[in-house]
Amino acid sequence: MPKKRSGGGLSPTQQAAKFLGVSVLAGAVLAGIALPAVGALGLAAKGSVEGFDALPANLKTPPLSQRTTILDAEGGTIATVYSRDRTVVDLKDISPYMQKAIVAIEDSRFYEHGAIDLKGVLRALNKNARSGEVSEGASTLTQQYVKNVFVEEAGDDATKVAQATQQTIGRKIQELKLAIQVEEELGKKKILENYLNITFFGQQAYGVEAASQRYFSKHAKDLKVQEAALLAGIVQSPSRYDPVNDEAEATKRRNIVLNRMAQVGDISTAEAEKAKKAPLGLKVSKPKNGCITAVKNASFFCDYVREVFLSDKVFGKTRKDRAKVWNQGGLTIRTTLDPQAQKSVQQSLKDHVNQSDSVAAASTLVEPGTGKVLAMGQTKPYGYGKNETEINYSVDHSMGGSNYGFPTGSTFKPFVAAAALEEGRPATQEYSSPYEMPYPEPVQTCSGKPWLNTDGATVPNESESEVGPYRLKEAMALSVNTYFVQMVADIGLCPVMEMADALHVVQGNGDKLPEVPAVSLGSKGVAPLTMASAYAAFASRGMYCTPIVIESITQKIGNKQKSLDVPKSTCSRAMSEKTADTVSTLLSGVIDSGTGKQAGLTDRDNAGKTGTTDERKNAWFVGYTPNLSGAVWVGSASQQVQMKNITIGGVYHPLVFGGAVPGPIWKDAMTGALAGKNSPSFNVIDIPDEDKDKKKDKDKDKKKDRDKDKPDDGNNGDEGFIAGLTNGGTGDGGDGGPGGFPGGNLIQGPGNGPGGRR
């Protein structure tokens, strides 16, 4: 009795028999299509074949998905990514042995029949009927190619794949009709080429070129006869005949193919016997797919490239459209990554912070005037194990970063200074700057409704020795908190917000900064890439350029290539040249004699600013030369670690300051990145010092207190008091964490911790 499927209905044998019967009754259709093209045209007869003729005969062949290669700025490969590991090649670039082997084992009469092989159908039906099961198929290479097109079009959609491979009469008839079209339009050689490029060979390899590279680490054009036979044998069942996991079974299958090649006259019996005695000769190249496999420690940079592609409308109107292009692949993406800078960044991070430390560090370098991201690294590598992470600490949440970014502390103060200078305040501006004071009120806002310190919140400096009056130059060098809150009260919050907008400084979650005085002390989380790009505007004399990571893209569709448009950096004037030059002069003082002395470069002009947040959960150094800007952040991504009495990179720190850990990382990263590069100079602005006698007396008192109150580590006053003012001065930490910053776990979401240390 014929066997039925477990779900009921006809068995495959019965379906095949029914298909044959239907075809014969429909006007000897099989007789017509068994002939070459002339016979196929005979199907136009009216009557019983009208239903067959009504079937669509337009095979939409989607471009074959291929691997994408991501390159650095010098053309070196960073990573390959793909949904299908495939490289399309011409038939002339496929070994003749491979062409003969696949035809011999899959469709030995390929060059003799049309879209269907009548002899093969009858032979298969006879054999299957005797055995009571489907032990032999009858699909021609052309029919198999059509089925593979359906599978390729289905992509990773499991439902569509199931539909494309279902064994039903309707599906077989549809494949048959389309196979006729393909035979007429493409011809045998092109069908063979397409088949060898589309079919699956196991081990994630699609197409013969990828398979040849996977199993033998060589091009398909260089395959020997025994190697070609092995690959041809895999196609029938890639899992069963997988030579990596079952060498014996794969060898048996290879030898069957060699025997078949000898039977059809492709090789001699002697050649077949010699090849059968040869070892498999595998030289397996493991699949390397995705940014996790990136070289140069550039996994996070690679991932950022992918996020840029998926988010930028230059690559498609919707994210779905862009994802389709990305998954289609065949892209060669040349990026802005500078190998020298990337190596320097990663080495510097490794030298100062261990992967196993309770805190992490991230660093990003940007080229002023172009927006090119030259390097991006962090100490917790890309991965899913212990001390690894998928989170890119350098970028915004929407681009794969942390939920909120990281509070910037005093590295925000240069933005306040730039806003004041743009408002016409002189570089010698002086404020009383007491050690501690209530937040001044009222403070004008963009809305016109003044901010009021309704809770009487106060702000102190880092040390009791920091007592004014101060001028801007010294206040910036020492990072005096009370000076900058007085500056904000003087000019109002709106100019500060406008400067932040001009420099594209937003929170890590994409929100604009809140219009409250505490923002001037770095109360909100910002990504390192955002900070490096903002400081690059000071280096480029006031011109802000949006960051870019893609230089060019070419896409290979089939065997043809085309160039794609890529995002361009948009540069705009954020401040006057004089303001930018003045800030650079001020920040040079931070490195020369202020809180950033440990970060200073000795061979070129450089400027920068330290930053340390409440409870020492975050430490920063952001700095630049005229031709390179960089940001370094150190802290716990979860914001749970207070960097007090802590060992980082094997070095014990009683207290971590922005100049003590991030500063040296920045120095080493910049030194290596700039080695051998030009050393341009800043346009220095003459900023008069305060009265020398007055300063001398004040310095004596300060030195006594400084020596008494805290360790001599070259960092004064960059800690900052960030009270809970981000929701209008509630005085309780706003929505939690340091200074209104969402506390608790940055990755999981906001918490409800108290604001500030004091």
Image (cartoon, rainbow, N blue to C red):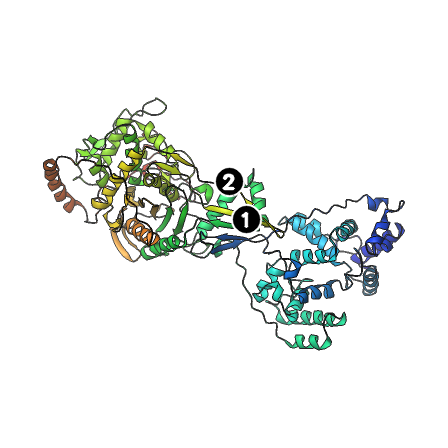
Measured from the top left, where is residue 400 in percent x and y?
A: 46, 45
Q: Residue at x 37, y 49 (%)?
A: 362
Q: Are marks 1 and 2 in contact (CB under 8 Å)?
A: no
Q: Secondary structure at mark 1?
A: strand
- Mark 1 against mark 2, which lies toward the viewer? 1
Whether residue 613 sits left or right of residue 263 in the image: it is left
Which numbered disc covers residue 312? 2
Measured from the top left, where is residue 39 in percent x and y?
A: 85, 53
Q: Earlier in the sequence, mark 1 or mark 2?
A: 2
Whether residue 117 sits left or right of residue 609 in the image: it is right
Whether residue 199 sits left or right of residue 652 in the image: it is right
Q: Looking at the figure, which quarter contains the C terminus?
A: top left
> Does residue 172 appear in this view?
no
Which amino acid type is marked by label 2? Asp
Measured from the top left, where is residue 201 in percent x and y?
A: 64, 61
User: Crowding near pointer 2: few (<14 within 10 Å), some, many (20+)?
Assistant: some
Which amino acid type is marked by label 1? Thr
